[in-house]
């Protein structure tokens, strides 16, 4: 793959404050303003028009009460939305942890199965050794029977027909005299020990299988909780949207009663303030982007994995550990290899949807989770700063972001450390952690 230069990307962080932008007046408000402005133009042209209705203090007071009530209801439902989103983030982190636990249980099961297979082979070797010893003794017994079972050792030797047979019988007599009982006893004891070891290995395998099944069940339950909480967030978000529409209608009604001129002046002032705030926010964003651009590349061959806003740091949360740092950015934002190395895995990953695992030249494994698309495959070598994927919202995710992990000990699914100081030590700065 060709290396892509780093470039700033627009950032849209989940649950982060967005820069203020000018809002267009609603259709109802625009219609009210147009009516009053048209009346003013006609009046200035000398056309006599009837005086507009002068709303009473009671009407204005009722309109303000209705607006305040609608605003209070919007505030209440906004609190419910925030709480639901926080709960969704909690179960998402727990689902990630359950996915990691499942991978560890699967790895332990494979190790137990390998151990059980090895003990089975050792058991077969011990049985073969016992069988060989039994055959050798059977040969001796047959020879003794054919030569007379009551012959003494010396007689058996004298009965030999030639020097070759004499040597063989002497060696066999010595072997049986010295080792017959001991060899069979030791081999049978070894066979029993191997059988016990095989039973223990099979029991360990059964235990690991049960552990894996429990981990799989926990993972499924966590994923179901995520799905349920996503539905809850969608429900309260829809309620909030409906209440915001009611609030907007109440605001428009109050502006109409206060008078077209006052409404227009208020809208102009609001528009000017929001445009000024938007300009300031844009200037701050440009300054921050310039600062981050300078800090994107470290001086030791390491690169920031993605541009965006840090929304979640490494550490314990809700009884489990969040093993990485979350960098929120729009879907499609480039994801870069933090260090040069070889891709170990790319594609579907439990909890992450899609993920890429890279073993760096320094031995550390870096993980890039929840990506929307990935552009590398296992076994491929990549360079630091090379685009390997794009930010996504797959798997157990509450919004578009990159989940970045570091495993300095080289393990694929364990040994995670806080990636922020790890990157900082290599010249890359990640803020907000």
Image (cartoon, rainbow, N blue to C red):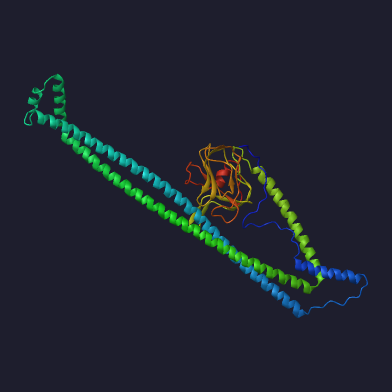
Which corner quadrant holds the N terminus? top right
Compared across the picture, whether 179 is left or right of 292 comes to left
Res 318 visible: no
Looking at the image, which residue sits at the far left? 150
Q: Is residue 18 or residue 196 the one in the foreground?
A: 196
| Residue located 21% across and 40% down the image | 188
Q: Position of residue 3 (x, y in %)?
A: 63, 38
Looking at the picture, does residue 355 appear above or below residue 173? below
Compared across the picture, whether 229 is left or right of 179 comes to right
Q: Position of residue 373 (x, y in %)?
A: 59, 47
| Residue located 71% across and 49% down the image | 286
| Residue located 86% across and 71% down the image | 39
Res 92 visible: yes
Looking at the image, which residue sits at the far front? 146
When asked about the image quadrant of residue 214, the answer is bottom left
Compared across the picture, whether 174 is left or right of 83 comes to left
Q: Position of residue 91 (x, y in %)?
A: 52, 58
Looking at the image, which residue sits at the far right? 46
Q: Is residue 158 or residue 273 the one in the foreground?
A: 158
Q: Position of residue 132 (x, y in %)?
A: 22, 34
Looking at the picture, does residue 313 appear above or below residue 114? below
Q: Is residue 30 or residue 302 the one in the foreground?
A: 30
Count of marks placed on residues: 0
């Amino acid at each position: 793959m060709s290396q892509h230069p780093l470039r700033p990307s627009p950032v849209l962080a989940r649950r982060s404050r967005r820069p203020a932008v000018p809002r267009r007046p609603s259709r109802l408000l625009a219609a009210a303003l147009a009516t009053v402005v048209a009346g003013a133009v006609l009046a200035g042209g000398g056309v006599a028009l009837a005086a507009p209705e002068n709303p009473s203090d009671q009407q204005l007071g009722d309109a303000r009460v209705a607006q305040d009530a609608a605003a209070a209801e919007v505030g209440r439902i906004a609190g419910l939305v925030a709480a639901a989103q926080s709960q969704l983030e909690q179960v998402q982190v727990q689902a990630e942890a359950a996915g990691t636990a499942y991978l560890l249980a699967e790895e332990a099961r494979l190790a137990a199965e390998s151990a059980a297979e090895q003990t089975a082979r050792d058991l077969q070797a011990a049985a073969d050794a016992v069988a060989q010893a039994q055959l050798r003794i059977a040969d001796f017994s047959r020879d003794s029977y054919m030569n007379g079972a009551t012959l003494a050792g010396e007689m058996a030797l004298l009965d030999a027909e030639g020097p070759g047979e004499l040597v063989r019988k002497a060696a066999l007599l010595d072997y049986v005299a010295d080792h017959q009982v001991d060899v069979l006893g030791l081999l049978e004891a070894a066979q029993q020990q191997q059988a016990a070891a095989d039973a223990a290995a099979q029991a360990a395998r059964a235990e690991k299988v049960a552990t894996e099944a429990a981990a799989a069940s926990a993972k499924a339950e966590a994923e179901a909780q995520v799905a349920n909480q996503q539905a809850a967030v969608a429900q309260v978000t829809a309620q909030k949207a409906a209440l915001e529409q009611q609030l907007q209608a109440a605001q428009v009604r109050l502006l109409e009663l206060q008078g077209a001129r006052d409404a227009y002046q208020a809208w102009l002032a609001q528009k000017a303030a929001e445009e000024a705030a938007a300009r300031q926010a844009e200037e701050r964003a440009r300054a921050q982007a310039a600062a981050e651009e300078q800090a994107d590349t470290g001086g030791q061959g390491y690169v920031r994995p993605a541009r965006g806003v840090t929304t979640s740091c490494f550490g314990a949360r809700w009884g489990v550990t969040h093993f990485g740092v979350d960098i929120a950015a729009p879907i499609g934002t480039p994801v870069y290899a933090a260090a040069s190395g070889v891709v170990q895995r790319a594609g579907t990953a439990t909890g992450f949807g899609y993920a890429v695992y890279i073993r760096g030249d320094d031995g550390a494994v870096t993980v890039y989770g929840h990506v929307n698309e990935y552009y590398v495959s296992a076994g491929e070598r990549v360079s630091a700063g090379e685009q390997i994927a794009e930010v996504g919202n797959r798997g157990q995710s509450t919004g578009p972001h990159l989940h970045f992990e570091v495993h300095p000990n080289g393990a694929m699914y364990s040994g995670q450390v806080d990636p922020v100081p790890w990157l900082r030590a290599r010249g890359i700065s990640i803020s907000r952690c």
